[in-house]
Image (cartoon, coloured by chain):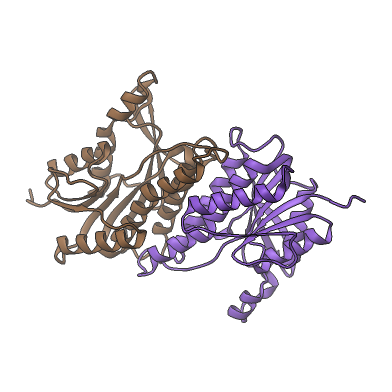
Chain colours: A brown, B purple
């Protein structure tokens, strides 16, 4: 067994899902860099997001990851940063929340795409955070839907020849319906939790893909469908 | 014949396509408000975009349109504002251009959605500016693709129950491949211009939909396919 199984950047490694992913990769002997607003005690490196603009954040994150790698390449970039805010186009908060969703979802996903183009090795992987509802209209959460639709399309761009990724990389998005997180348990206590996807399922899936097993076709939007506690993958 | 055929806001009414649309509606006796960075001499009202943030621009535009309407309702909101910038995720300009595309395409489209929810009458119409390539990956223009994918998804949201539009409205996006504009003639002089869509086709189509003729299903993304100078509509 190698002492170093691989190198991964987890963007959003302090969220509930991010923490599960950092933990899973660490348990498997990976070098893990966390990019987030707060440090993770589990990660080998922490890169705290700085800057008020999209360009400033990208420069800071890319320079910091480059310095942490010291010339090494990454096996995987996993972005799970995001947030949620509702509002139809008729809502007084529509634009404010669209702005929030863009900054919390599309900025991290596109900076992760930039990291992938700069630092992935051949055969590496970049996985972005999609959302199952956003493959159609989302009238009650219009800003969230726009941001996630952009992430889906970016995933498809990354999978195309000419994206700048090295050969044989996987670019994919996972599209959860509802994740089984402490926040969702708190705010949706009465929902049918047998349809919620366990974080352990997601972290195991990402590790599997990272080591080259059971990868979907590059460019895939992979919906996570959980029924009676069992999760299956549906490419949309 | 009525002296006032209808009321339309054209967002981006000073661009090449916008000017063609303002002209067409004026010729048919409509009241036309132009929202743009510069005034149109053809329009009845001009609302110049102000504000550095998405929220500021929305507040200014929505308040100004509300004042110009003096309690009347709109028959149509047509947004044709946008821009173009290339760059793969590996490009040094990827994030800078993604930011530009977001501000030039998604801000106007979402503010137009907001205008539509506030001011359209029952049976009205809102049309947003999509792009044919962005229904798949666009590796050489990744930021442009994300912005247009967001506009496509917003169109679908607007068509759903719960979007806040009045009953029987049409929400659609038109997805040109290449428009026959002076700029495109200048920069792509050697391209096959028999596949370029004439602005007259687009302005006539929008007027037709505006008066309730030959409307596509709400939520449609309508690709404009021009071959040998003939344009057909393909819903994607």
Q: Residue at x 16, y 67 (%)?
A: A71
Spot the residue most to the right: B1
User: Residue B235 in the image: x percent, y percent?
Assistant: 65, 50
Q: Residue at x 31, y 29 (%)?
A: A183
Q: Along the line of sight, which residue is nearer the eye, A19 or A183?
A: A183
Left or right: A136 with respect to B31?
left
User: Residue B157 in the image: x percent, y percent?
Assistant: 57, 41
Q: Along the line of sight, which residue is nearer the eye, A217 or A151?
A: A151
Q: Along the line of sight, which residue is nearer the eye, A1 or A94?
A: A94
Q: Is residue B203 visible from the viewing direction of this image?
A: yes
Left or right: A179 with respect to B167?
left
> Residue A116 is drawn in which quadrant?
bottom left
Q: Residue at x 62, y 46 (%)?
A: B115
Vertical relation: A168 (above or below) B67:
below
Left or right: A29 with respect to B58?
left
Vertical relation: B169 (above or below) A77:
above
Q: Along the line of sight, which residue is nearer the eye, B191 or A33?
A: A33
Left or right: A61 with respect to B36?
left
User: Residue B61 in the image: x percent, y percent?
Assistant: 59, 53
User: Residue A119 in the image: x percent, y percent?
Assistant: 25, 62
Q: Is residue B135 visible from the viewing direction of this image?
A: no
């Amino acid at each position: 067994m190698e002492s170093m199984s691989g190198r991964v950047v987890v963007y959003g490694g302090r969220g509930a899902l991010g923490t599960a992913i950092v933990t899973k990769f660490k348990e498997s002997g990976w070098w893990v860099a966390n990019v987030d607003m707060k440090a993770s005690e589990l990660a080998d490196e922490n890169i705290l997001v700085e800057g008020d603009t999209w360009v400033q954040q990208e420069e800071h994150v890319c320079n910091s990851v480059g310095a942490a790698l010291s010339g090494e390449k990454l096996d995987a970039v996993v972005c799970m940063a995001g947030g949620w805010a509702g509002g139809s186009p008729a809502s007084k908060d529509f634009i404010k929340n669209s702005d929030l969703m863009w900054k919390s979802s599309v900025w991290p996903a596109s900076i992760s795409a930039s990291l992938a183009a700069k630092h992935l090795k051949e055969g590496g992987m970049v996985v972005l955070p999609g959302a199952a509802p956003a493959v159609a209209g989302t009238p009650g959460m219009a800003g969230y839907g726009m941001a996630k639709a952009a992430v889906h399309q970016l995933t498809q761009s990354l999978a195309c020849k000419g994206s700048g990724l090295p050969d044989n990389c996987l670019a994919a998005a996972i599209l959860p319906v509802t994740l089984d997180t402490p926040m969702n348990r708190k705010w949706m206590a009465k929902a049918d939790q047998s349809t919620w996807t366990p974080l352990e399922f997601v972290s195991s899936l990402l590790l599997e893909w990272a080591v080259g097993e059971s990868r979907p076709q590059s460019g895939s939007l992979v919906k996570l469908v959980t029924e009676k506690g069992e999760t299956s993958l549906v490419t949309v």
